[in-house]
Amino acid sequence: GVDLEDIKNRLNICISSLEAWYFSEDTAIGILKEHFQIHSLESIGLNDFACGSIAAGALLKYLYETQKKFFVPYVFDSPICDRKIYGY
């Protein structure tokens, strides 16, 4: 196994664990669909990437819960298709 305490001490970082449901496919896909206001992951090119979708959904859920002050106000202000935000 991996010695998490050793890694934390050597790199001077914080490591926390998440419950298994963060990584369920249904939860992750639901979070992504809600966040990007889409009906299918095909809209954002993730329909063939189950592992990537799960990772992205878990990360997004984590951000929702830990970065409320900075993250949530911007979540629905601008849909992903609004290219002006991203400089396109």
Image (cartoon, rainbow, N blue to C red):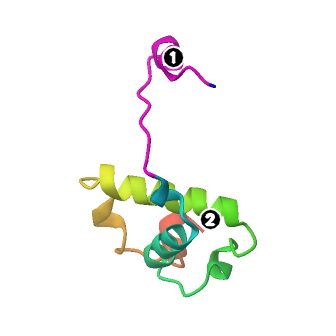
Q: Which residue is mark 2?
A: 53
Residue at 44% x, 73% y: name it.
35
Left or right, 7 with respect to 53, comes to: left
Residue at 44% x, 78% y: name it.
34
Residue at 44% x, 23% y: name it.
13
Residue sitting at the far left:
69
Residue 3 vs residue 28, the one in the foreground: 3
> Which badge, 2 or 1, is on the more N-terminal residue?
1
- Residue 19's label in the rendered image is none
Task: Identify which amino acid the numbered label 2 is placed on.
Answer: Ser
Q: Secondary structure under badge 1? A: helix
Residue at 55% x, 87% y: name it.
39
Q: Height in image: 17 above or below 43?
A: above
Residue 59 vs residue 26, the one in the foreground: 26
Q: Height in image: 57 above or below 34?
A: above
Magenta residues, as a range? 2-19
Quadrant into which the C terminus falls: bottom right
- Residue 11's label in the rendered image is 1
Q: CA distance from mark 2 to mark 1?
A: 28 Å
Find residue 73 and report its image quarter.
bottom left
The image position of residue 78, as x and y in percent, is 41, 74
